[in-house]
Amino acid sequence: MKAVSSAAVGDKARTAYRSRRSRWISDPDAASVDTVTVALHPPSETAVAADPDAAVSWVRSWHSYAGCGSVSWETRRWRSFGTQDVPVRITLSGAAEIAAAAGRAAEWRTLIARRQRLIDELGPGTAGLSAAVASTHTRWLGLDDEDFARLVGVVGWLAAHPRSGLLVRQLPIPGVDTKWVSRHRGTVEALLEGVRGDRDLGVRALPRMCEVAVCDRLLLPSAPRIFATSIDELSSLPVNPSTTLVLENKEGLHALPHLPSAVAVHGGGYSVHELATVPWLAASDVVYWGDLDTHGFAILDRFRQHLPHVRSLLMDVDTATQWRDLTVPEPTPAGHVPEHLTTTERAAFEFVRDGRLRLEQERIPWPYVVEHLSAI
């Protein structure tokens, strides 16, 4: 085996640093006693005889080695060259020395300092915090000093006020707004779980606003024909339609004609199941009209799990075939396989899935849509 050069020590240290760093952060005691040993594979007597100059140069390089680690030497007794001391291994002791050999000394110092700050300020002695700190280290390591300080402040405040009920923008933490929390929410939740055992921020989010079209003005004569409201307020509307049309395209919602005893509601994509909590909607004949692609059928499937009587509109093979020239490729099909489709819907699902097709509902010519709306 070829003798190992000093450059190989850095390679071995970098490999160890990458694979062990998370464990070291979780267990500082283990980090302090961990070691990396690199076998140097000194040349054999035969190799020395074949190229004595190279062997001498290699031994001298290790005599002058000034890098990290401790070099161990052993005596070799060779028939042709007598007694020679040769380096046989180098040992790096402790995470700090391994990090230095890997060229990551500054990064490791930052990791240790930030880890200690998280532990000290968020919950010294908290059983789960060390594991949470370790599992999130790649995320908080990448923050600049100001964002890291915000992270500590946010998690600390939320831990101390588990049921504040404030909106995110109301949190009394300098420099923190809705966008900051959204960007770092996963890290905040993971650390919060480490501190107190749950991921609930205890804050209040702005309600999802749902657009509504009153397709028969007699149902709600005092309201605008089209308006937006929260799910809670939607539930309290004094309306009792025979039919509720749920669709995904807001432009289509605004273009709907008069439909006797009907109300139309924007579905909100994969949040559509929230509409099942609206009593008057659940009691009506519910018709879902989504895009003709795998996601449209996945949303329909989710909706039907909560409202089994939901019917679909224009989600069939005939529509997909007739207007195929208006389809586009579906770039990222849904991974979910729907289990609550009718035979007709499943055939359409398989048609668009196998062809990787997307027919967005707003692409379908409006006269064709109106013709089918009249039959709902």
Image (cartoon, grey):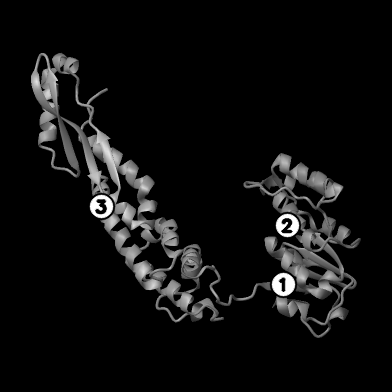
Q: What kind of residue is marked 1? A: Glu
Question: Which residue occupies the foreground of this view, 150 or 351?
Answer: 150
Q: What is the crowding at mark 2: few (fewer than 14 residues within 10 Å), some, or many (at least 20)?
A: many
Q: Looking at the rendered structure, which numbered label has been put on residue 211?
A: 1
- Left or right, 195 with respect to 44, comes to right
The residue most toward the bottom is 222
Q: What kind of residue is marked 2? A: Ile
Q: Residue at label 3?
A: 96
Q: What kind of residue is marked 3? A: Ala
The residue most toward the left is 82
Comes first in the chain, label 3 or label 1: 3
Measured as percent of width and height from the top left, residue 175 is found at 40, 75
Mark 3 vs mark 1, CA separation in Å: 58 Å
Which secondary structure lies at badge 2?
Answer: helix
Q: Residue at label 2?
A: 299
Comes first in the chain, label 2 or label 1: 1
